[in-house]
Image (spheres, rainbow, N blue to C red):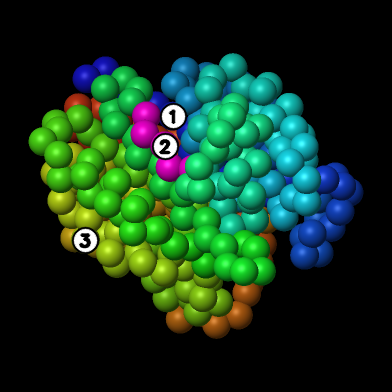
Amino acid sequence: MQPLTFVHISDSHVMRDPTRRGWERGPSLPGARALVREIEALPAPVAFVLHTGDVNHDPEREDEYRQSLELYRQLSVPVYFLPGNHDRNVWLQRVLRGVEGPGPHADQELETGGVQFLLLDSSATDAGGNVGHGQLAPGQLAWLEQRCAAQDSRPLVVALHHHPLAIGVSWLDDLILLNGDALHEILLLARGRLRCVLYGHIHESLLTLRHGIPYQSVRGSWFQNRTWFGQETEFPEPLQWPGYNLVTLTEQDTFIRHCRVRL
Ligand SMILES: [Fe+2]
Ligand SMILES: [Fe+2]
């Protein structure tokens, strides 16, 4: 295969009021705009951008996604969006993906440069609307298992919003993907070709290795956390610059470069 490079970003939390100080962390648009400018000016070509969710911040109307559409349209490569716990997945599918009759889950399968990408919609709702933790429905796990168990030699990348495995940080582990262990058991079926599992949600760059599978998150586009194993309360990272990861797949290797943008 030819080397394939793409950009992983997450958690832009675009708000309807650009001056709104969500959670007292400042407006979210400057970081998202800085990332778009940086990605567009990269000195080496990238095939696409993967956004792993919390694209918008608790939108109340579908047309709030137009703001994100206008922002990411400035990129000259395709952008693939996943919903997070602050998104509304049906609105995201309609506006950002152009899907006319969206289903209840925004899972997506793609192939680029001979690599298979499985994007899993981990957003979950209860009677009151969206909830913070994530969950994959039985049908979604079956969809994934069918693909992971198949005879397939293509390199595989899996992406979702929530962290599937506990990270040892209690206040974030309250917001985990509830059935991450079941997800991991399925992913083991494809261990020989699974290059990485990419996620956002925790607003920090963290690598977890379990049974040889790398689970890699990316810094937020809006605000950064600093965590450590056993942490019980939130701690902001001193340098609040947004980040992105440059992921390169070659025949043998997987490279994940951690980059930051000065604000
Ligand atoms: Fe987020
Ligand atoms: Fe999130």
Q: Amino acid at mark 2?
A: Gln
CA gap, disc 1 and disc 2:
17 Å
Question: Foreground: 106 or 216?
Answer: 106
Which residue is depicted at the point 48% across and 25% down?
48
Q: Amino acid at mark 1?
A: Phe
- Asked if residue 91 lies left or right of residue 255, the reply is right
CA gap, disc 3 and disc 1:
27 Å
The residue where tag 3 is placed is: 185
Residue 122's spot in the image, x, y percent?
47, 55
Residue 6, numbered label: 1
The residue where tag 2 is placed is: 108
Q: For the residues labelled 3 and 1, say whether their Cβ atoms are less than 8 Å apart.
A: no
Q: Earlier in the sequence, mark 3 or mark 1?
A: 1
Can residue 141 be found in the magenta stretch?
no
Residue 225 makes an appearance in the image:
no
Residue 30, numbered label: none
Which residue is depicted at the point 36% across and 34% down?
109
Q: Earlier in the sequence, mark 3 or mark 2?
A: 2
Residue 6's spot in the image, x, y percent?
44, 29
Q: Give the secondary structure at mark 2.
A: strand
Q: Amino acid at mark 3?
A: Glu
Question: Foreground: 260 or 3?
Answer: 3
- In this view, the residue farthest toward the left is 151
